[in-house]
Image: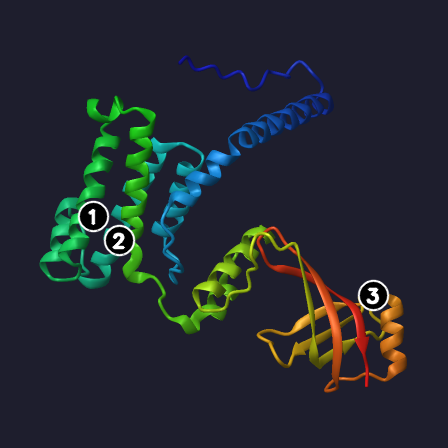
Amino acid sequence: MAYIDHIKVDYSDQTDELRKEYIKRDKKYLAQIIQDRIAKDIDNIVNRWYELNDIGHIPVEEKFLDLLKEAEQLYSFGYYTGAVAIVGIATEEYSKFLYCKYIGGVDKLTQKDRIDELQKFNHISNILKNKLHDIRKIRNECMHYNAGFKTLQDEELKLKAKNMLNLYKDVLADIVDKNVDSINKVISAFNSDSEREFVLKCRNIMMKNGVNLQLPPNIKNQVRQSVYHVEEVDIEGTLFKEITLFDIFDGELPLVVDLTIPQSDHISESGLKEGNIIFATLISSVSDVGMTSEWNLINIDVP
């Protein structure tokens, strides 16, 4: 397939102000092209992302993890050769990390010799050594772009990229945080511009630590009718009126309940305060990720 660039033109014959407007318009159109491309392939992008193994939380900040994220993105968007190349670089960087940690000194070894040295002194297992060598061999095929690699069909190349990514994740499994008590640390350390991603990963972390907040896919709303302990009443001088309740009979986490102005006035007039026991009916819609979202009050019986 021929390569055709032509994503921009020369506006040097225009005034500075007009040239900026032309470029602004062109960039806006390019953004639409990208959005269309992603929308057209969105199911495949998600499926490819979901195919990769999930290894949890790795509590270190190293370049070989940044490269893992980059390789995952490349694979998800169907750029398999790039994914293979980046995993190869990441694995070599990780091997250097292990060599520096366990052996030290000046590391001028080839990747093959580095892996063998790590295994020779029992810093990695024989199984891990073999996985690192498997990655190294695929990486070499890619970087030298030999005939066998160059003639791979798309599905064959995809399989190589997926296997290589999953092998690399297997290799990293030794430094995964397996401490169940670290859940709060993991969530607090999570950094993402996407609220959706944050919610999904928090849900999954909670589930893997025995706290399942997810409802079955066929449930669209949840109604809870129970006896609650009033944890907090926040209705004075705030734009958002809310009350925090804890289910005495079936409580795992406190529920923050949004209040309407009439409900807030009723609670104020009734003299309800923190520490009271009440009977209430609550309702919440179930979000796209299977968790309850905002809780709303249907009725409340204040003693």
Q: Residues within 10 Å of mark 2 (few under 14, many from 20)?
A: many
Q: Secondary structure at mark 2?
A: helix
User: Please, what is the three-letter code of the amino acid marked with disc 2?
Assistant: Val
Residue 283 spot, x, y in % from top left? 72, 64
User: Please, what is the three-letter code of the amino acid marked with disc 1?
Assistant: Leu
Do we see residue 110 in this rendering? no
Q: Earlier in the sequence, mark 3 or mark 1?
A: 1
Marks 1 and 2 sit apart, C-alpha to C-alpha, by: 7 Å
Residue 45 spot, x, y in % from top left? 47, 36
Quadrant in the picture for the N terminus: top left
Image point 60% across, 76% down: which residue? 251
Do we see residue 105 in this rendering? yes
Q: Secondary structure at mark 1?
A: helix
Q: Which residue is mark 1?
A: 132
Q: Secondary structure at mark 3?
A: loop
Q: Residues within 10 Å of mark 1 (few under 14, many from 20)?
A: many
Marks 2 and 3 sit apart, C-alpha to C-alpha, by: 51 Å
Image point 57% across, 19% down: which residue? 8
